[in-house]
Each structure stands twice: as C-alpha cells, then as structure tokens.
Amino acid sequence: MAGFVQYDSGEETEVNSWIRFGLRLGVSAALHPFEYSKTLIQLGYEPIAPLPGKSMLGRPIMKLPNIFQYAGHIRRVDGLSGCYRGLAPKLVGSLVAMVVSDRVADKLGLEQPEEIKDDSQLSEEEMYVQFKSSLKRDIVLTVSGIVASQPFHVISLRMMAQFVGRETLYSSIVCSVTEIWKTEGIVGFFAGLVPKLLCDVACLVLSSSTIYILNKYVIKDKLGRQYNAGFTQFAVSSLLYPLQVVSTCSAVSGSRLMAGQPPIMPAYKNWMDCWNDLQVRGELKRGSSLFWRSQAIHSPATSFAPLPKLARYQ
C-alpha cells in the first residue's frame, strides 16, 4: 500500500523512545518556572519576608512563601518570559545527554532490554538477569549523560542565579561559554559534577535494588509492583536530596555572580567543604518542601531584603 511505512521492532522502539523524550522535554519546559524557583531556594535566596503563623501542632512558626508564590514573585520582577530564564541550555543539555548516552551504551554493546508488560510471570532467574542487564545499562546511560550535559547544566543554573544580583554575564549559551572559559577554564564547566553523579547513581542503584528485592520476596501482584516502584524512587530521592543542594551551590560557587561570592556564599574549596558548611548551618534540606515552607520562630534572625540582596534561612 503506497505511503505505508513498516517499522521493525528496533525502529519502533527507537521512535517510541524519541516520542517519550519529546513529551518529557515538553513537561520540563512547562514546569521550568517552578524548577527556577526551586533553584533559587536551594541557593538560599529568600526575597519575600516570612509571615507569622502556626504549625499543625500549634507551635509558632514563620511561614515562607511556597513555590507558587515564589514563581509569582519572579514573574512580577521579570515578566512571564523571565520565568523561563535558563530553559534553553537545560533543553540542549537534555538532548545532548540522550544522544551521547545512547551512543556510549551502543558502543559498549549494552542493548536496551525488551519491555515486559507483566514481570510477575518471570522466574527468579529471569528476573535477576533482567535486573542486572537493565541496571548496568542504566548506570552507563546516567553517568555518560550527566558528564556530557554538565556544562549546559552549569550554564542553566548560573543563568537562573543571575536573578539574585541582576547580572547579565550569562545572557546566552555563547556568552556563558565565553564567561566560564575566561574566568574558570575547563574546570568551570563541570562545577558540581561529583555530588550530582553521586546523587543520581546512588539513587539509581538503591531504588533499583530495593524494587528488585521487594518484587522478588514481598510483592507479587502487578499493581503492587507499580506502586512499589514509584514510592521507592521517591523515598530514595528524598534521602539523597542534600546532594542536589550541594551540587547546585557548587555549580554557582566561584563564579563572578553575586549569588556565588562572599558574603552571600562562602568561597568553597570543593563540594565536601560546601556540604560541611551547609550541614553546620542546617541547610542541607532547603528547597525539599515546596508547598509548606516554614522556619522556627526562635531560629537565628534572618534578614529579608528586596533585590539584589540575598537572605538565608534555616
């Protein structure tokens, strides 16, 4: 029949993967204003003064703006288009990560395992073989993808961090590359790489292993396994969240941006120095709660000021 194209299973799988990738990019772009707000929160920037309130237990607290109020503040300052600062390098980085990671996996002979709609019918040996092959490929995809896309990730974070000091050093991808190369060299493109790798790889290994063990010994029905996967991934990512904060701060630290220089941010020697500093100040979890944000009313005084000054909170 004219105009009818038939795909073999390999081509169909590749087409489906690109469709899913396109959908993920679309969702990522739509939610970018909230990711933008979360990044600034992780950097410790609080432009809106907290309001007095009470916790669920009736204790006096200071309520911090939630993610919607924070995004609304960015829109009031920079307009709707300003809410998408840093989106372009983020999308480019995602594309680079997918292409490079797939090429690396193919070069190493790590083929994508066939999708199995109901793995409850698999034997224990088949489940283990599938788990081992999938985990090996996923680790390669994760590591190669993160390394390849890290320069774009750094550029995206620094574009967003410019909101703090109202700079324009990172106005485009080309200008950002020039700025990082002149001031920090090639090392600057991979700032915050180690904690990001540790976070994503550890999350992958721990969640995959936990899901496999629970599915093998505890959960037998298909629906239960689907819920198990989602809950386990959420729990592990929450456990490793401090590494995300450290990675974000390390990616901005040392730049010429106000958000990455003293007195706003200490001059960190490395990511472990950043971890220790945030741990001492109790700020390793900042940004982990996006809807109900608060601080104890008896916590150390925090100054909240309009742009371009930055305030920290606990």
Image: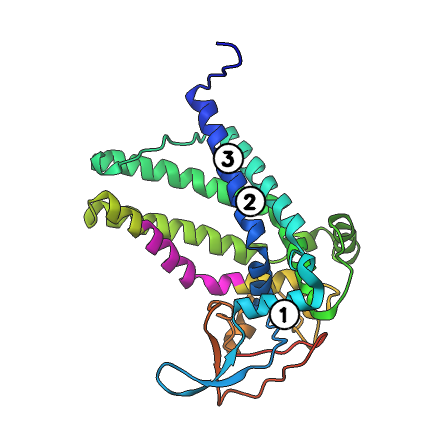
> Dot 1, how many residues are within 10 Å of its Cα: few (below 14), some (14-19), or many (20+)?
some
Q: Vertical placement of 239 versus 93: above or below?
A: below
Q: Vertical placement of 60 versus 177: above or below?
A: below
Of badges 1 and 3, the one in the foreground is 1
Amino acid residing under circle 3: Ile
> Which residue is the extreme one toward the top?
1
Q: What residue lies at 66% left-to-right and 63% top-to-bottom?
A: 252
> Which mark is drawn over residue 312?
none
Amino acid residing under circle 1: His
The image position of residue 303, as x and y in percent, is 63, 84
Query: Which residue is identified by label 2?
Result: 25
Of badges 1 and 2, the one in the foreground is 1
SS for tag 1? Answer: helix
Q: Is 231 included in the stretch rendered in magenta?
A: yes
Q: Is 277 included in the stretch rendered in magenta?
A: no
Q: Pick the residue in front: 18 or 211.
A: 18
Q: What residue lies at 66% left-to-right and 59% top-to-bottom?
A: 80
> Dot 3, how many residues are within 10 Å of its Cα: few (below 14), some (14-19), or many (20+)?
few
Q: What residue lies at 54% left-to-right and 67% top-to-bottom?
A: 68
SS for tag 3? Answer: helix
Is 174 left, or right, of 69 in this rendering? right
Query: Which residue is identified by label 3?
Result: 19
Q: What is the magenta range?
A: 229-244
> Which mark is drawn over residue 73?
1
Q: What residue lies at 41% left-to-right and 49% top-to-bottom?
A: 204
